[in-house]
Image (spheres, helix red, strand yellow):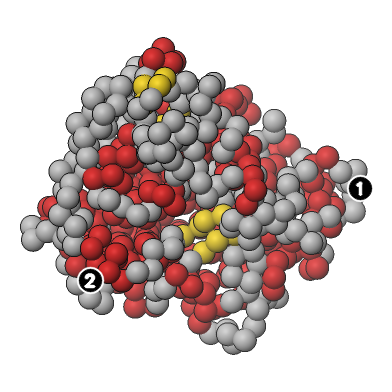
Amino acid sequence: MKLFFENRLPVRLMAAMIFFGLLIISSTGCTKKFDQLNTDPTSFSTLPPAALPKALARAQYEGVYGDPGGYELIHSLFTDLWSQFFADAGGSASDRYVINQDWIISQWNLTYTVNWPSLKLVIDGTEGISPAANAIAKIWKVYIFHQNSDFYGPIPYFQAGLGTLSIPYDSQESVYMDFFNTLDSAVTVLKNTDPAQTPFGTDDMIYHGDITQWIKFANSLRLRLALRVSEVDPATAKQQAETAVAGGVMLTNDDNAFVDVTSNPNSSNGLCDEAPWQNMRMSATMESYLKGYNDPRMQQYFSPADLDGQYHGLRNGLAPADVTSATVVGGPFDGAVNLSNINLVRWNPNTDGVTKLNVIYSAESYFLRAEGALNGWNMGGNAIDFYNQGITLSLQQWGITDNTAIQNYMNGTTTPAPLSDYLNSPAVANIPVKFATDPATQRQQILTQKWLALFPDGIEAWAEVRRTGFPVLYPVVHSDNPDVPTTDIIRRFTFVEYEYETNGKATQAAISLLSGPYKASTHVWWNK
C-alpha cells in the first residue's frame, strides 16, 4: 500500500483517479473504489470546478472513517477499546494494548492517500475563486489532521502534498498553532460572506453549505482544541477558548454535525455495517456508570443480553482464555456462541443507510465551556449551568425528552455500580451525577458526563481520557505491550513501520520531537 500520494503517483494521475471516481458518486457523495477505475494519467493536473464538491464529499466521508473496513480498523479495534466504550469479546490483542502495524496503516493511508489528496485539490481549486468554499475545506482540514496528530504526536503536515521526496514531520505544538490560525482565518472569511450562499450545496455532506452552521462548527472545534492544550499552554488555551465562545459555538441539537449516508455500500454507515463482524461488547466501565446512574441512554447505546434481557459489560484487556471462561448471568460468555449477547442497538446493517456518521455533538461544547468556567475563563456563564445543559442536550439527542426524567437524572445521587462479573469488579468510581460543591469533584463529573455524551466517538473519548485522566476507567486485565503497564493507558500510536522504509530519514528525525522515548507509553505534547 502506498503512503504519500505525492511520492508515489504524479499529482495529475492522482487528480485523474479522484475525478473519475467522483463521477460515479454524484448521487451518493462518496466512494472507496476510485483507485480501481481506468483513468487517463495525462488528462488532469487539477480537478475541474464541477468535481470539487464531490472531492469534498469524499474527504468528509472518509474523514470520519465512514466505510466499515476503516471504521473497524481505527475505531473498533483501537480507540473504542482504549476509551473503554467497548471491550472485545474475541480476546483481540489490541484490547491488551498491542499495536498491530498491519491495522494502523489503514488510518495513515486514509489520511495521506485518500482524505488529504482529495481535500488538497479542493483547497487549491477554490483558492482565490470561492473564499467561502475554501474556508469550509480548510476547517475540514483541521478536523482530519487534529485527529491524525492526536494519534501520533508529530506528523507530516506543513509539507504533506507539496511533492517533495522526503516529507518532514512537524511538532504537534506547531501543528496545533496552525490549527488555531487556520480556524481563525476561516471563520473571518465566513463571517464576511453572504449567509445566503451555499458553498458545495448538497455535496457538503455535513451542513449542505450552511455558512452559519460552519461558523459554529469551526468555533466548537476551536474550543475543543483550546481545552486540549490547556495543561501545556494555558495562556493560549484561554485566549482561543474565549475567542471561540465569543464567535458563537454549537448550542442546540439542530447544530449537531453528522455526515450524511445512503444505502449505497460505498457511502453507508460503517459502524452499522461492521458491528456484526466481530466481538464488540459493552465495556465493564460503561456498565458500571450507566447502571449506577440509572442512565436512560443505556437502552439507546446497547441492546440487552439474549440470555436474560439485562445489560452486562466486559472488562477490557481479557485474554482469549479469560473470554471463553467469563460468565454473565445465565451462561458462558463466548463470542463465537453468543455473538449478539451484548450488541449495539442503534448501529446495525438495517439502518446503515439512514444512521448518519457523528462528527461533533453540541452537548460537547457545553461540557467544554463548563470545564473552561472552572478554569476561570469567560465562557459566558457558570460551570453548573453548562454542565446541566450538556446533560440535557445529550439525553434529548438520544430520545429522552421527558423533563421530569431529565431533572431526575441531573439530580441523581447514586454512584457507579459494582459488577457481578467474571472478576467481581468493584464500582469503577464513586461520584454521582448531581453537581458537587468542590471543584475537583466538579471537574471529574464534567469529564465523566462528557465521556458518556461523546459515545460512540472513541477517537475523541480516548484523547480526552489521556488529557484529563477522566473518567476513571477500570485497569485493563492484561497488557501485552511491555511499554504500557495495566496501571496506565496507551498514550499514542507508534509511527507506521512502512514510513521507515519510504520516508525513513524524516521518520527517524521525528523521534526527537517526542516528549520521551519512542514508546506507546510516551505522552503526546498536549498530554502533559
Give whichever of 167, 483 is nearer the camera. Answer: 483
Taking the spot 24% from the left edge, 45% from the top edge, the residue there is 292
Taking the spot 24% from the left edge, 67% from the top edge, the residue there is 407
Taking the spot 73% from the left edge, 47% from the top edge, the residue there is 265
On the question of residue 398 being in view, the answer is yes
Give whichever of 193, 177 is nearer the camera. Answer: 193
Residue under label 2, please give it.
385
Residue under label 1, please give it.
40
- At which x and y percent is residue 256? 48, 66
| Residue 230 vertical placement versus 349 (above, below) | below
| Residue 260 vertical placement versus 518 (above, below) | below
Q: Which mark is residue 361?
A: none
- At which x and y percent is residue 469? 25, 42
Taking the spot 8% from the left edge, 61% from the top edge, the residue there is 437
**In the image, is 244 to the left or to the right of 183?**
left
- At which x and y percent is residue 150? 43, 44
**In the image, is 290 to the left or to the right of 218?**
left
**Mark 2 crowd level (few <14, some 14–19, many ≥20, 10 Å Cα):** some
**Mark 1 crowd level (few <14, some 14–19, many ≥20, 10 Å Cα):** few
Q: Say which element carries label 1.
A: loop
Q: Say which element carries label 2.
A: helix
- At which x and y percent is residue 349? 64, 45
On the question of residue 492 being in view, the answer is no
Return the disc, 1 or 2, that comes first in the chain's sequence. 1
Give whichever of 264, 231 is nearer the camera. Answer: 264
> Label 2 is placed on what type of residue?
Asp
